[in-house]
Image (cartoon, rainbow, N blue to C red):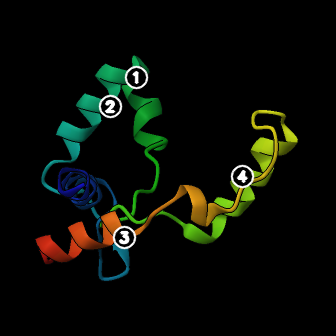
């Protein structure tokens, strides 16, 4: 989990940094763009405009998890909705981020 948090921070700092209220490319922006382009096999320009948001500490949008579970059930991808608390344990991410500090 610590590796995931480190990777989230590296990606966020390279792609999603904001300075004075405006987005700025981080030092590793081109490296991230190259890696994503290589492993998705998508055109570089398409990747550059479609890089997704990633929380810097790898946090999930916890309030959206029940929405996703409901959607999976509606799509018949799971038999019935489950309680998000039964399938998602956020403490691993929280402990990893705390252990790494800022």
Whole-angstrom CA distance, mark 1 to mark 3, is: 30 Å
Any mark on residue 36, and which? 2
Whole-angstrom CA distance, mark 1 to mark 2, is: 6 Å
Does residue 28 sit above or below 97 in this rendering? above
User: Which image quarter is the C terminus in?
Assistant: bottom left
Q: Is residue 77 left or right of residue 65?
A: right
Whole-angstrom CA distance, mark 4 to mark 2, is: 28 Å
Q: Secondary structure at mark 4?
A: helix
In the rendered structure, are the residues bearing label 1 and label 2 in contact, judged by CB atoms less than 8 Å apart? yes
Does residue 82 sit above or below 24 in this rendering? above
Farthest residue to the top: give it.
41
Q: Secondary structure at mark 2?
A: helix
Q: Which residue is mark 3?
A: 91
- Can the viewer see residue 26 in this picture? yes
Q: Is residue 3 left or right of residue 24?
A: left
Query: First in sequence: mark 1 or mark 3?
Result: 1
Farthest residue to the right: give it.
74
Task: Tell me if mark 4 has few (under 14), some (14-19) or many (20+) residues whose alpha carbon lies within 10 angstroms of its own.
Answer: some
Q: Which residue is mark 1?
A: 40
Whole-angstrom CA distance, mark 2 to mark 3, is: 29 Å
Q: Residue at x 28, y 63 (%)?
A: 24
- Can the viewer see residue 23 in this picture? no
Q: Nearer the viewer, mark 1 or mark 3?
A: 3
Farthest residue to the bottom: give it.
20
């Amino acid at each position: 989990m610590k590796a995931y948090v480190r990777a989230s921070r590296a990606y966020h700092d390279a792609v999603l940094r904001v300075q004075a209220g405006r987005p700025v490319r981080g030092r590793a922006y081109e490296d991230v763009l190259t890696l994503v382009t290589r492993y998705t096999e998508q055109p570089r320009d398409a990747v550059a405009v479609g890089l997704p948001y990633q929380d810097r500490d790898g946090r999930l949008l916890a309030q959206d998890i029940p929405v996703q579970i409901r959607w999976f059930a509606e799509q018949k991808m799971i038999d019935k909705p489950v309680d998000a608390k039964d399938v998602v344990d956020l403490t691993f991410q929280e402990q990893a981020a705390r252990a790494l500090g800022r």
